[in-house]
């Protein structure tokens, strides 16, 4: 019996030592989080609630998260809405944009609080670049044909929303998102960025390989041009809802690697 106890004690100590080495190894190989703030910006055909699947995942990792309500009126007003939120952050901040709001991230990302940029199936123009002209060098995505206007306000038809914007979501969930779709003003699409924050800030990009709203090859081009750390997600334009784990991990990587 004494031998058995001795053997058990030896094994227990060996296991504890191995566990300690293992935990130290993980601590040594996992970079600490450097940016504890994340600011999320939504694009067209949506509101701030489109980040509802990503937010709790980031909060569970200890990050302070704010989702901006983009007014969708003009680019300067949309950028100002993000800048006001960035002004309130108490340190390094990861700025994240989906879809059209890549324009906002590219412009507002020069804010001194911004330590890294994350683009989720998003526009990523260069300074003073005509994004519309750039997009025309690629096949037109199907969702473009589904935009309808009521005067100066544009929105996606229900059919285009369900099929081309949120195509990999359950129909019932997609219809809820359609119900909170916010119209955008025509003038918003005329705006150009005067800065390209990705030229000076660490950048990350999530390409949606099944995207029918922005051409996936255009997304790949923009990601490569900016030298972004890039992932490809088999998802519709709404990877932030259909693949929230992948998007949250990319944002967390940006928070860990922030300069």
Image (spheres, grey):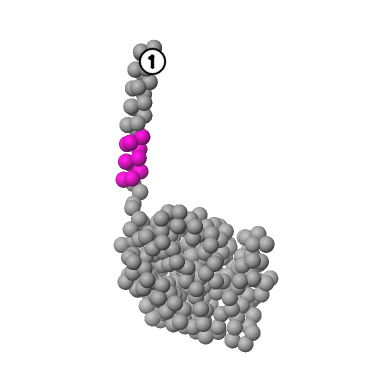
Residue 243 quadrant: bottom right
Q: Give x and y (percent) for residue 94.
A: 39, 64
The location of residue 185, given as percent across then percent down, is 55, 83
Instruction: Indicate whether residue 23 is drawn in magenta.
Output: yes
Q: Which residues are magenta?
A: 19-28
**Residue 24 position (above or below residue 140):** above
- 175 relative position to 68: left or right: right
- Residue at the (31%, 62%) spot, across then down: 259
Q: Residue at x 38, y 15 (%)?
A: 4
Where is residue 215? Give x, y as percent: 55, 69
The residue identified by callout 1 is 4
Viewer-proximal residue, 130 or 168?
168
The secondary element bearing badge 1 is classed as helix
| Residue most extreme to the bottom | 151
Image vertical order of residue 125 relative to residue 10, above or below: below
Residue at image position (35%, 13%) is 2
User: For the residue carrying disc 1, how many other residues have a C-alpha within 10 Å: few (<14), some (14-19), or many (20+)?
Assistant: few
Does 233 sit left or right of 38 as displayed? right
The foreground one among 138 and 27 is: 27
Residue sitting nearer the eye, 90 or 196: 90
Question: Can see residue 26?
Answer: yes
- Can residue 239 be seen by looking at this rendering? no
Main secondary structure found in the magenta portion:
helix
Image quadrant holding the N terminus, namely: top left
- Within the magenta stretch, is there residue 198? no
């Amino acid at each position: 019996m004494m031998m058995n106890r001795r053997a058990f004690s030896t094994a227990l100590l060996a296991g504890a030592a191995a566990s300690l080495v293992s935990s130290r190894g993980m601590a040594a190989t996992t970079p600490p989080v450097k940016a504890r703030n994340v600011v999320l910006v939504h694009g067209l055909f949506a509101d701030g609630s489109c980040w509802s699947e990503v937010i709790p995942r980031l909060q569970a990792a200890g990050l302070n998260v704010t989702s901006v309500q983009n007014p969708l009126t003009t680019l300067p007003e949309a950028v100002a809405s993000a800048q006001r939120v960035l002004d309130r952050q108490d340190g390094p901040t990861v700025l994240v944009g989906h879809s059209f709001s890549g324009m906002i991230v590219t412009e507002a990302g020069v804010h001194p609080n911004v330590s890294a940029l994350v683009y989720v199936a998003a526009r990523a123009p260069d300074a003073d670049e005509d994004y519309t002209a750039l997009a025309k060098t690629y096949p037109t995505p199907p969702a473009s044909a589904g935009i309808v206007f009521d005067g100066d306000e544009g929105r996606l038809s229900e059919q285009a929303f369900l099929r081309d914007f949120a195509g990999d979501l359950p129909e019932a969930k997609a219809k809820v998102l359609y119900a909170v779709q916010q119209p955008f003003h025509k003038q918003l699409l005329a705006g150009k960025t005067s800065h390209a924050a990705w030229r000076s800030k660490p950048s990350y990009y999530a390409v949606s390989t099944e995207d029918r709203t922005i051409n996936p090859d255009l997304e790949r081009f923009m990601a490569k041009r900016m030298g972004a750390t890039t992932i490809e997600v088999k998802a519709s334009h709404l990877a932030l809802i259909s693949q929230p784990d992948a998007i949250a991990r990319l944002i967390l990587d940006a928070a860990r690697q922030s300069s």
